[in-house]
């Protein structure tokens, strides 16, 4: 204790003023006039509604990606005290006073601003000079498209921030001396790599590609370690396990935790409920849960149930019947059985109620104690209101003539006997004697006589003609081609029937279900369902005015108009810094050409540059060119609507390549002093052109000041750009 | 089953009628040739699966495919022998391929797959052979194998585009090879260039020449108009005997007053069409319908007029005035005298586009009838050529482009195709048109032969059409398609013939024992390869035998695994309809891998046993067990490929019931 006091308390701070200055510049460029325009800009209209739903705790499904990005945006709203009351209906709508625009836009802007010092650090960690690092940071700082994208409630800047953070922390980790293995800072950078990767993937699935790149890099580095004889086997295994933990397990756990948070935050039912299964809906407050709360779990003989088709596409629907019959002849001349129609109906209705009956007994009430229906049992299904039996027979169905018609049986006495026995098969059973459960069990009904399976043929979206009230067709599918979801049904509403008489029963059917009993889905079950929906849910391809193809991005043949002032000509565009884009492309080409040249000559034992410079060139280029490739090339395989902003992560990596190539040129290819000074002069000239382009385009980046028509026309450097001109 | 496709195409070759298929022509040409040589006259209609051949001579075609299919066995045998230098490994592979029910079924019928697999294995074998000749470069056998590789590559590419994967495999192997040579400092630069040029010659130029020659033969043989015409452009159709564009003479350049038809450039795009009927109530403005119609009809005729003068240009006295790029014109429908018109009402089906109508009486309308005519990739003032110019019509008032959306209109539109004006200015064939018929009495007619497309153009066009056709094979809703992950686990087969209980049924399904053995082996191989690589990297000292074994596992096995990956993984990214039989090329690689892996594994295990006789016994016994297992399983499953009669296997009384190991099998 005393020993400690003998020494003075000394704090030595080492402040890299470059870094501080860059951070300040970044903040200035991204935060300046942040709450202007006070109107909905471009995709804010899309993300904004999710923020509102977070504020109101209403459940939603967004098929574009995982929830972390939305949650971060919502955090801004939470801190700004946003109550979620704003109608996000059109781009350009003025924000009302209750919307804290500044704090909503703050987080993406901060992330965008921090990318500037991150770029600086990355280049330093790649062992490049501070001058090159400064260049990289300034290029990022002056990139108009990155500025535009980070100033609004959009996710790209957050994604880029996490990607750069992951790369930086991996480099820091890799550059630590071997003696500090398993030390505090070693663990810190390793874990930070994993965490940043998880966040990147959690914001947008595009982050996955950078994550894979880093994994490959870590694998490569570990492979070199294996070849290093100075490591013992045990320490190798320890290294391997540590990397596995930090780069695989932690990201996975974090990814799960994002969903956990998402599901905990959103506990109210909302607009996207019907996409999810009944079990999922029942776990949300309000909506279905209000109805199903407290219904009996086990379906018994005499139960009154509604049956929902599991597929739920194109819309959810319930097994339904009504007193009308199939027409004797259809429009195309085929005949029907003229029995009562059975359809799938997309709305709740008293005609959706069915009673489970034991074929061996007459009664339609639940005995005491209830006799549960198990997998493999044979039942009859009685339509509650008309008390007719669900039936199918070898008559062609109205719309799909290859399948059997399903009807509610009417005895016309024409030697067409009732075939109304159905075997209950629980598809997601755990044992063969499992009880049919409300909501949880997914059931197939197999017809005993013809072994046809009850199916809602709603897939094609075709509905019955007028005589069937445009409801969806239900058929018996003869060949059981695997388990398709349209053949599965689950019980949604359920109660034990008590009324002996038909009149009483009708009253009972009309009354809402009420009983007490609760059940809950586990988090993992909810997660897998939600994840699956996010991955498989496909919005139909929508043509968009500003959509573009991946090839247009390299040359920036396209732009996106984000916002236009309602009266003046002030406008905001996603438009990159042409000088930067061109030089980034040149740098990439130069890098590829030089590398090819070097690699072939080295193979012939001709070394143009020293070994360590070569290693530096390889690793730095590998990360930046590799990062560009993994973030860009996958778009050629994607079939979704693409926009220019999808290119920004790739562009960031490509920009990092420019100073790398420049420094290499000046260090190794400019051999005389004169050449070197000429090269520096050129670089400065080139850099001022970048600054000039930034200044020229900054009015459409920041949306102010408003330009005149001729000035705007002068900005249209490429014919394919779409600058908005007001008609006089 | 698919015999109806490929048999029919064989017939087309014999009858010399033109057809269209998404695959390149070599496979079908060979089938046609085999049929021709065996005396088949091309008259069998091949209408639906299950039709009897009756008196038609089909054995030649089947025999040809079966012969190529059986060649796979020696090819695989030789390849494995070359890679592993071990007779038992090669034998195991051969047994696997002989006794796999799937391979047997697939090569028994008139299909492209046996031909594809023949060339593919041929390419792999010659590549491997060529590699082992590497110590004697430029010797006769080296040249022979190298050029044989090239020939086989051309063959594989010429049968199906899946052949591209084997081209990739050979390409990667060659790059690796050259890289090796580059590092060999004892070779002079001149020698290196010789190596490079030899490979360029044999593996790039030779296959390309053969591939082109194949298409040349294809187009020479098929010179009669047939069912495939509609897929191709007007210029192409003019080459076919019997097509109504053949030997037609029309004026070459478009002039005012000309009567024309306009064909949309999208695949199977129709002619711009209009008729007296109006759009129904509630669908945009109630004006005359404009559609795209696939058949030739008088209502497809339009007259080109100037936008500002109504003077009758057909007046014989007025001078001929040509239409130029960038001109603003009016299109008048000949039958109804209404102008092509568009306005800011939403189109009937594509709601984001504008409606296109016929408007005005006797040619007088309003400014919404003005269209700017532009030729793609041309400057202002150029003339517009019939058939060859790709034309875009821009609506002057709204700036939208005339296009066909490809959606079929409901009953009120006579189920013709919707025509819209799209405000999204994008270059797609949907919004491009060309002029096909052209009547103008004042202009001299020239024969279309002047416009004859060159061979290169035909080649390019047929490839574009094939690629578009392939990507058009999207799975329809409701259709149960097979997923790539089903394949290696033999999840679901393909019914070749016969559905009912009394039919003679053939079911394409791999021998499950073999397939599951292959599947396990892939996992085993990865394990072995990784541990071998790590051992070598750690610098563990190995005996010479083990070193040799490691080399075989890494180099030979690596090549084969690469082949398997290249023939399997790309299917995961394909959007088109996939079938089980797409896996068979990959399955061949996987079988070869099985041979190599088990040989290495048994050798390695036997190496630990001390007396060499015991070791040999274990080694031999292991192989014997595997082979017996394969033969026995074939005995069990052979009815799959040679045909079954009797109740379905889902019925417990069927003899095959006990063999229905997975619920998804339907034999």
Image (spheres, coloured by chain):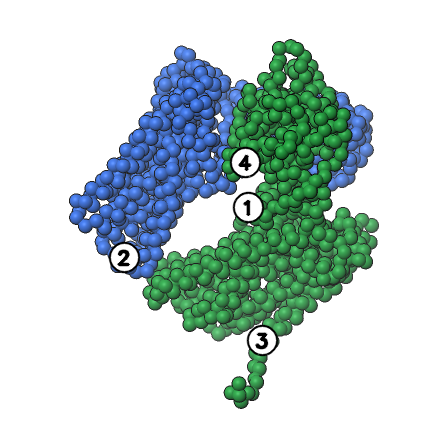
Chain colours: A green, B blue
Q: Tell me the residue at 76%/28% (across/down).
A: A504
Q: Tell me the residue at 54%/36% (across/down).
A: A434
Secondary-structure class at tag 3 = loop
Q: Give the foreground label among 2 and 1.
A: 1
Q: Give the foreground label among 3 and 2.
A: 3
Q: Is residue A16 visible?
A: yes
The residue that label 1 is drawn on is A636
Looking at the image, the residue that sits furthest to the front is A368
Q: Give the foreground label among 4 and 3.
A: 4
Task: Point out residue B286 in the picture as x, y percentages from the top left corner.
Answer: 80, 28
Q: How many other residues sit within 10 Å of disc 3, few (<14), some (14-19) or many (≥20)?
A: few
The chain letter under disc 4 is A
Secondary-structure class at tag 1 = helix
In the rendered structure, which disc, 1 or 4, sits on the residue that comes first in sequence? 4
The residue that label 3 is drawn on is A16
The residue that label 2 is drawn on is B186
Secondary-structure class at tag 4 = loop
The chain letter under disc 2 is B
Q: Give the foreground label among 4 and 2.
A: 4
In the picture, the disc for residue B36 is none
Q: How far is disc 3 from disc 2 in space, using C-alphas?
A: 53 Å
The chain letter under disc 1 is A
Question: Are discs 3 and 1 located on one and the same chain?
Answer: yes
């Amino acid at each position: 204790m005393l020993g400690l006091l003998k020494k003075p308390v000394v704090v030595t701070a080492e402040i890299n003023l470059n870094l501080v200055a860059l951070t300040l510049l970044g903040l200035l460029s991204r935060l300046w006039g942040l709450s202007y325009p006070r109107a909905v800009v471009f995709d804010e209209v899309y993300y904004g509604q999710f923020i509102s739903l977070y504020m109101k705790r209403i459940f939603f499904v967004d098929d574009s990606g995982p929830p972390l990005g939305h949650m971060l945006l919502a955090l801004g709203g939470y801190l700004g005290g946003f109550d979620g009351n704003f109608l996000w209906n059109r781009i350009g709508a003025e924000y009302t006073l209750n919307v804290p625009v500044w704090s909503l836009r703050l987080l993406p802007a901060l992330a965008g601003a921090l990318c500037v010092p991150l770029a600086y650090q990355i280049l330093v960690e790649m062992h490049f000079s501070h001058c090159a690092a400064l260049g990289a940071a300034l290029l990022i700082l002056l990139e108009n498209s990155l500025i535009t994208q980070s100033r609004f409630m959009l996710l790209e800047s957050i994604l880029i921030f996490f990607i750069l953070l992951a790369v930086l922390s991996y480099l820091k980790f890799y550059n630590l001396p071997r003696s500090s293995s398993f030390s505090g800072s070693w663990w810190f950078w390793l874990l930070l790599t994993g965490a940043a990767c998880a966040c990147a993937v959690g914001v947008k699935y595009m982050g996955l590609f950078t994550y894979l790149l880093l994994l490959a890099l870590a694998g490569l580095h570990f492979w070199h370690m294996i070849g290093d004889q100075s490591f013992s086997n045990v320490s190798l295994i320890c290294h391997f396990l540590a990397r596995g933990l930090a780069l695989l397990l932690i990201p996975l756990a974090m990814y799960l935790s994002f969903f956990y948070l998402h599901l905990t935050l959103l506990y109210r039912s909302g607009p996207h409920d019907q996409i999810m299964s009944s079990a999922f809906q029942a776990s949300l407050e309000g909506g279905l849960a209000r109805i199903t709360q407290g219904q009996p779990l086990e379906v018994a003989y005499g139960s009154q149930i509604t049956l929902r088709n599991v597929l739920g596409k194109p819309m959810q629907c319930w097994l339904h019947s009504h007193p009308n019959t199939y027409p004797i002849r259809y429009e195309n001349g085929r005949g029907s059985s003229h029995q009562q129609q059975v359809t799938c109906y997309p709305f709740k209705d008293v005609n959706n109620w069915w009673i489970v009956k034991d074929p061996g007994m007459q009664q339609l009430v639940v005995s005491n104690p209830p006799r549960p229906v198990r997998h493999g049992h044979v039942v009859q299904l009685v339509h509650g209101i008309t008390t007719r039996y669900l039936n199918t027979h070898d008559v062609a169905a109205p719309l799909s003539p290859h399948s059997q018609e399903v009807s509610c049986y009417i005895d016309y006495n024409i030697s067409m006997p009732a075939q109304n026995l159905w075997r209950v098969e629980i598809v997601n059973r755990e044992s063969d004697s499992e009880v049919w459960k409300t909501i949880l069990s997914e059931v197939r009904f197999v017809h005993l006589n013809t072994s046809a399976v009850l199916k809602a043929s709603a897939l094609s979206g075709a509905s019955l003609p007028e005589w069937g009230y445009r409801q969806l067709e239900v058929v018996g599918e003869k060949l059981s081609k695997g388990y398709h979801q349209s053949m599965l049904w689950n019980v949604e509403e359920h109660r034990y029937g008590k009324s002996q008489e038909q009149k009483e029963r009708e009253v009972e059917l009309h009354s809402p279900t009420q009983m007490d009993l609760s059940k809950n889905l586990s988090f993992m079950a909810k997660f897998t369902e939600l994840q699956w929906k996010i991955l498989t849910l496909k919005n139909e391809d929508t043509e968009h005015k500003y959509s573009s193809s991946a090839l247009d991005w390299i040359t920036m043949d396209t732009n996106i108009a984000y916002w236009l002032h309602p009266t003046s000509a002030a406008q905001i565009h996603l438009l990159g810094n042409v000088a930067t884009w061109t030089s980034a492309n040149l740098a990439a080409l130069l890098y590829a050409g030089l590398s090819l040249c070097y690699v072939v000559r080295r193979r012939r034992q001709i070394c143009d540059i020293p070994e360590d410079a070569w290693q530096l060139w390889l690793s730095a280029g590998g990360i930046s060119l590799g990062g560009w490739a993994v973030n860009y090339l996958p778009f050629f395989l994607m079939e979704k609507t693409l926009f220019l902003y999808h290119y920004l992560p790739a562009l960031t990596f490509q920009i990092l390549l420019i100073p790398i190539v420049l420094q290499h040129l000046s260090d190794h290819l400019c051999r005389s002093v004169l050449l070197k000074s000429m090269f520096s002069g050129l670089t400065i000239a080139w850099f001022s052109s970048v600054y000039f382009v930034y200044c020229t385009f900054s009015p459409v980046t920041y949306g102010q000041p408003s330009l005149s028509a001729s000035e705007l026309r002068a900005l249209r450097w490429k014919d394919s750009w779409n600058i908005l001109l007001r008609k006089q | 089953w698919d015999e109806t496709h490929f048999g029919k195409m064989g017939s087309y070759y014999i009858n010399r009628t033109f057809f269209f298929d998404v695959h390149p022509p070599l496979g079908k040409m060979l089938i046609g040739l085999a049929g021709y040589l065996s005396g088949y006259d091309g008259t069998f209609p091949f209408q639906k699966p299950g039709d009897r051949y009756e008196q038609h001579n089909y054995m030649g075609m089947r025999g040809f495919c079966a012969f190529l299919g059986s060649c796979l066995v020696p090819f695989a045998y030789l390849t494995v022998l070359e890679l592993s230098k071990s007779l038992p490994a090669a034998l195991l592979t051969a047994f696997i391929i002989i006794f796999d029910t799937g391979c047997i079924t697939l090569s028994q019928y008139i299909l492209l797959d046996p031909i594809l697999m023949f060339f593919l294995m041929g390419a792999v074998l010659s590549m491997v052979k060529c590699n082992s000749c590497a110590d004697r470069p430029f010797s006769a056998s080296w040249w022979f194998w190298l050029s044989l590789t090239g020939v086989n590559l051309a063959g594989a590419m010429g049968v199906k585009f899946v052949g591209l994967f084997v081209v990739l495999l050979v390409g990667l192997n060659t790059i690796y090879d050259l890289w090796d040579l580059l590092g060999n400092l004892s070779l002079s630069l001149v020698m290196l260039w010789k190596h490079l040029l030899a490979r360029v010659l044999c593996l790039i130029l030779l296959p390309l020449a053969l591939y082109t020659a194949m298409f040349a033969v294809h187009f020479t043989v098929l010179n009669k108009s047939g069912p495939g015409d509609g897929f191709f452009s007007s210029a192409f159709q003019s080459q076919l005997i019997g097509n109504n564009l053949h030997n037609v003479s029309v004026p070459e350049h478009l002039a005012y007053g000309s009567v024309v038809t306009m064909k949309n450039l999208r695949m199977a795009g129709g002619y711009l069409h209009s008729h007296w009927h109006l759009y129904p109530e509630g669908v945009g403005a109630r004006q005359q319908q404009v559609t795209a119609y696939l058949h030739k009809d008088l209502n497809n005729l339009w007259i080109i007029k100037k936008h500002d003068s109504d003077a009758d240009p057909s007046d014989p006295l007025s001078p001929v005035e040509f239409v130029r790029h960038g001109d603003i014109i009016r299109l008048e429908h000949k039958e109804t005298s209404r102008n092509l018109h568009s306005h800011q009402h939403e189109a009937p089906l594509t709601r984001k586009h504008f409606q296109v109508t016929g408007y005005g009486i006797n040619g007088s309308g309003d400014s919404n009838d003005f269209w700017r005519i532009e030729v793609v990739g041309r400057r202002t003032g150029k003339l517009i050529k019939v058939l060859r110019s790709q034309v875009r019509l821009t609506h002057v008032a709204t700036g939208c482009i005339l296009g066909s959306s490809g959606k079929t209109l409901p009953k009120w539109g006579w189920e013709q195709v919707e025509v819209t004006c799209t405000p999204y200015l994008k270059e797609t064939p949907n919004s491009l048109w060309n002029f096909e018929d052209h009547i103008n009495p004042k202009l001299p007619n020239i024969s279309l032969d002047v416009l004859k497309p060159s061979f290169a153009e035909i080649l390019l066009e047929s490839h574009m059409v094939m690629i578009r056709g392939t990507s058009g094979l999207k799975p329809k809703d409701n259709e149960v398609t097979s997923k790539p992950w089903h394949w290696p686990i033999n999840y679901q087969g393909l019914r070749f013939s016969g559905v009912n209980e009394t039919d003679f049924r053939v079911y394409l399904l791999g021998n499950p024992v073999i397939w599951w053995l292959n599947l396990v082996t892939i996992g085993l191989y990865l394990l072995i390869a990784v541990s071998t690589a790590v051992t070598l990297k750690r610098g563990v000292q190995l005996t010479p035998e083990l070193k040799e074994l490691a080399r075989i596992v890494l180099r030979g096995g690596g090549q084969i695994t690469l082949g398997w990956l290249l023939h399997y993984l790309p299917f995961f990214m394909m959007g088109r309809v996939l079938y089980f039989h797409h896996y068979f090329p990959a399955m061949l690689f996987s079988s070869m891998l099985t041979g190599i892996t088990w040989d290495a594994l048994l050798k390695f295990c036997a190496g630990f046993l001390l007396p060499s006789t015991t070791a040999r016994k274990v080694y031999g016994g292991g192989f014997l067990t595997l082979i017996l297992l394969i033969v026995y399983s074939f005995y069990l499953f052979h009815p799959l490929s040679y045909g079954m009669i009797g109740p379905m296997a889902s019925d417990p009384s069927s003899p095959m019931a006990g063999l229905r190991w997975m619920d998804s099998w339907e034999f």
